[in-house]
Amino acid sequence: MSQETPERSCTVADVRFEHVRDGLGLGTGSPRLTWTTLTEARDWHQTGYEIELTGTGAEPVRHLAESAESVLVAWPFEPLPARAAATLRVRVTGSDGAVSDWSEPATAEVGLLAPGDWSAAFVTPGWDGNAESDEPAPMLRREFELRGEVRSARLYATALGVYEAEINGSRVDDQILAPGWTVYDKRLRYQTYDVTGLLRRGRNAIGAFLGDGWFRGRIGFDGKTRAIYGDRLALLAQLEVEYTDGTTERVVTDASWRAATGPIVSSSIYDGEAYDARLERTGWTEPGHDDSGWSGVTVLERDLSTLVAPDGPPVRRTEEIAPVSVTASPSGKTVIDFGQNLVGWLRLTVTGEAGRTLTLRHAEVLEDGELSTRPLRTAAATDAFTLRGEGTEVFEPRFTFHGFRYAEITGQPDGFDATASVKAVVVHSDLTRTGHFGSSDELVDRLHENVVWGMRGNFLDVPTDCPQRDERLGWTGDIQVFSPTASYLYDSAGFLRSWLADLAAEQGENGVVPFVVPKVVPGADTPTAAWGDAATVVPWVLYERYGDAGVLADQYESMRAWVDHEASLAGDDRIWDSGFQFGDWLDPTAPAGRPDAAATPGELVATACFARSTDILARTAEVLGRAEDAERYRTLAAEVRAAFRSEYVTGAGRVMADAPTAYALAICFDLLGTDAQRAHAGDRLAKLVRGNGYKIATGFVGTPLICDALTRAGHIDTAYRLLLQRECPSWLYPVTMGATTIWERWDSLLPDGTVNPSGMTSFNHYALGAVADWLHRTVAGLAPAGPGYRRQRIAPRPGGDLTHAEARLRTPYGEAGVSWTLAGEELTVDAVVPPNTTAEVQLTEGGETFEVGSGRHTWTLPFVTGETAAAPLTLDVTVDELLGREEAARAFKDLLVSFVPEAAAFIDSGSGAAAGMTVRSIAAMLPDSGDFVAALEARFAELNDRA
């Protein structure tokens, strides 16, 4: 690059590799590069870049390109071999001709790439155990001699089970529950640790605790299944040391290691951990510890080709929360309220006599002042700590986690101060927060915060349905609907890429996607729409939100296999109407005990999802340059859409079942053939929502779509009323009941404060929080219009009684944001467009669309709400129309019920029997018609005057 350039006006920042924050232990020698540019210049875009690589030879190597690319840029050098480290710097040229300074150096270090890179072997304790019960956690150790000063050292390690490693008395890292949960027999992650600072010349020691975890512990919801992946815990560790003289040495797991048990008496993901401090082996990971009474180990044969480096962040402690109250329950037990439903465990500081055991139980809610443990089913969620009796002791578990807001402590010594001595430790995958939302409505903001906490609790190495009961599984349908929201709130790209690799690994040869991944429950190979469609939807979301075409390439065969299987099930008529379907799961209108028996038939849901997945596959093939496949699947998608219309849609646009989810699917998945059909379907959907009193009448499939469907159909006012409804079922009802996470059921907690009696009631279930994506894209008005937000759409749609909303997102290109404020009839919109991107802007529905470049922008314009003025209330209004006006409907119902108590059910039929009747005709049916009419006219007049 020429040095004779204009004054530098930009800075290159945050050079990173693939989707990981730390470049240590990369799983590829050719990692893709991403960087962001900071500049105050407007309309700035990159015209070229230069990358400098050092550490691979005597001289730096540089690569120069005329290109605007800055996200997941292909590695331009020779691939790095295993263990190699190299440092990169980047500088860019902008559209103003200025060249930036070099970025800060970023180091990429490759991990171990092939079985031949390993000389370690898996080792397991030499005794025979019983995998059908919780047993003491093994401890493995070895001492070794280092003959010189250490320049650098790396520990490569993993386990069959979960592990925590130490060197010379110090933990090697702050990761927990490593190596996490994957399809262990096909993909077992290993970790890379920089342990240079832990080693010293002379005698050293290394050791590790092992726990059952997901590998050998109890998993699934039958209460019995254990040891799914194997019956022996084992450690694989390879310590590689480089001395200052350039020579190297390895210390590996082999037959020389020693094994024993210690203070962890039992550990279970579901049931908790028991720790007896009297059994601690002081100094056991320091040199000189007497291990003469320890047992030997056995070497396990294991295919090392299954070892893979992590794609995303590890699980860590991310926050500590102090109690907000400590009370005595009616039974006299100490109950601690942390004010937030969270996932993790308790950290306990206590002094007491040896042998005293403190028992810690956990629950999400209270009933009658006591822990409500019934929703946990068979999960004990109980930790126990037995004191050593030597001064102040601190306990927190290693190999379990709990979902809870409340904790109960028993067995504590006299004078124990729970407020000062107990903290809740929040635990989840250590994702980077990227997206934020705020508004003028406190309840909506709390709803959004509940979504964030629901994601935090359920993104613990695997995207789970719930974090507290005997389940905690990677349900594919939940993440299918939630992935857009997840990809906004946190940098989820590496986390979800890893999970998708497990999905592909678990996929049957016939293309069936299990409904839980990893597949650990019987019958999970049943093909189910919306759940199996995670195979196509989640990769596409990652492409849209992160610009990662690589994930499409990696998942393409999985995506195609699933669509081909859907096609085989649908047959030549392209209607998928066979087999079990979860369908619109947990539709609130479904009968008790049949959450799959939704108002929208499962076959309609299945065929709609088949059409969508086929369309996504066609677009994926086009992105990847697979022209023949793209044409084939475009044709198939068109055939499925035509079959859907023929089977389920009338010429006018009414959809079979006449249920909200049916219309939402038809509108959002572009299944309707004409503008007239789309308009009629949208109007009918809005009428159904009004007729139901703006309460939710959709389940897992329809709920994430309904606000978008109403918005597309021109009924955003109806979408806002649905959003802002506070009666059950609604998004805000749980908020009014004190919820701090998203619930599995709209009525997980009943209005009287009792827990829903169903055996399937979670208070931390993110799926129904997928509405947050609509808050980001529509209420605030920030959406992707090109892969990775290379192009954004700025289109805020104020509504309801909101006077302000904002969204801020750290995109792959930098910070983007939209904020709007409504003052009277004047709307002010502020926007930030990141460097090297553009945005399409539409400030009013149906208004002009224009383009802007990077920088800060402000627009002020007159604003008229999209909701037209309501006609005056008269006796000739129909019940259906009345139910669309919440206050008038309430006045009418209250008055009618005071005259005829049994009339409530008749009116609640909404768009059913009472829908077309006028108020006048109903009044004529009453025995005291004149008094009723007089009272109602007076009430209507009051409401009209107020309007």
Image (cartoon, rainbow, N blue to C red):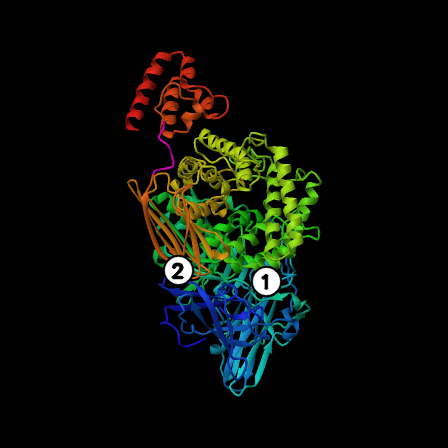
* Residue 77 visible in the shown view: yes
285 left or right of 327?
right
Identified by mark 1, the residue type is Gly
Q: Residue 668 placed where, x, y %?
A: 53, 41
* Residue 217 visible in the shown view: no
Residue that mark 2 sits on: 43
Instruction: Identify the main secondary structure in magenta.
Output: loop
Could you classify mark 1 by the number of other residues whose Cα lies within 10 Å: few (under 14), some (14-19), or many (20 or more)?
Answer: many
Residue that mark 1 sits on: 161
Q: Residue 200 placed where, x, y %?
A: 49, 82
Q: Residue 834 placed where, x, y %?
A: 41, 59
- Quadrant (top left, top right, bottom left, bottom right) of the N terminus: bottom left
Could you classify mark 2 by the number of other residues whose Cα lies within 10 Å: few (under 14), some (14-19), or many (20 or more)?
Answer: some
Region in magenta: 864-870
Displayed quadrant of residue 659: top right
Identified by mark 2, the residue type is Asp
